[in-house]
Image: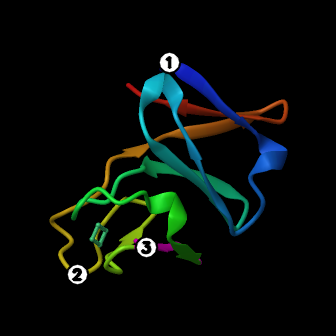
Amino acid sequence: MAWIYVSEEQELQEGNMVSVYPLGVNTVIARVNGTVYAVAGKCLHMACPLFMGTLDSYILTCPCHDWRFDIRDGRFLDAPELSLKTYPTKTENGKIYIDFN
Ligand code: FES
């Protein structure tokens, strides 16, 4: 595993998401029920920035045309064969890391 620092833990409140760019890769991290999830930051439809959408429990809705994704596995709800890339995360000493391998 190659863990890459992406954010201070305190900058990601419960139920929120933020945009981060580890190694220049557009990524969204979100915290739901205390767990941090990381998914690709661009929508599969027309690449709109997903961090500008809404998060309702585990469902991230794109701000442009309302495609909905489950942040736990990246799955597009209306066509589960499509999914956002997801990344493992860990939190250590108040810092959030993503594994890009
Ligand atoms: S760009 Fe996300 S739904 Fe169209």
Is 54 positioned to the left or the right of 73 in the image?
A: right
Q: Does 98 lie within the magenta span?
A: no
Tell me the distance, in whole angstroms, between the alpha carbons under discs 1 and 3: 31 Å
Q: Nearer the viewer, residue 13 or 99?
A: 13
Would the CB of label 3 be found within 8 Å of ligand 1?
Answer: yes
* Disc nearer the start of the sequence (1/2): 1
The residue that disc 1 covers is: 2
Q: Residue at x 69, y 69 (%)?
A: 15
How busy is the neighbourhood of tag 1: few (under 14 within 10 Å), some, or many (20 plus)?
Answer: few
Q: How is the image coloured?
A: rainbow
Q: Does 58 lie within the magenta span?
A: yes
Magenta stretch, residue numbers: 57-63
How busy is the neighbourhood of tag 2: few (under 14 within 10 Å), some, or many (20 plus)?
Answer: few
Q: Residue at x 29, y 56 (%)?
A: 47
- For the C terminus, the quadrant is top left
**Which amino acid type is shown beneath numbered disc 3?**
Pro
The residue that disc 3 covers is: 63
* Disc nearer the start of the sequence (3/2): 3
The residue that disc 2 covers is: 78
Tell me the distance, in whole angstroms, between the alpha carbons under discs 1 and 2: 33 Å
Is 77 positioned to the left or the right of 56 in the image?
A: left
* Disc nearer the start of the sequence (1/3): 1
How busy is the neighbourhood of tag 3: few (under 14 within 10 Å), some, or many (20 plus)?
Answer: some
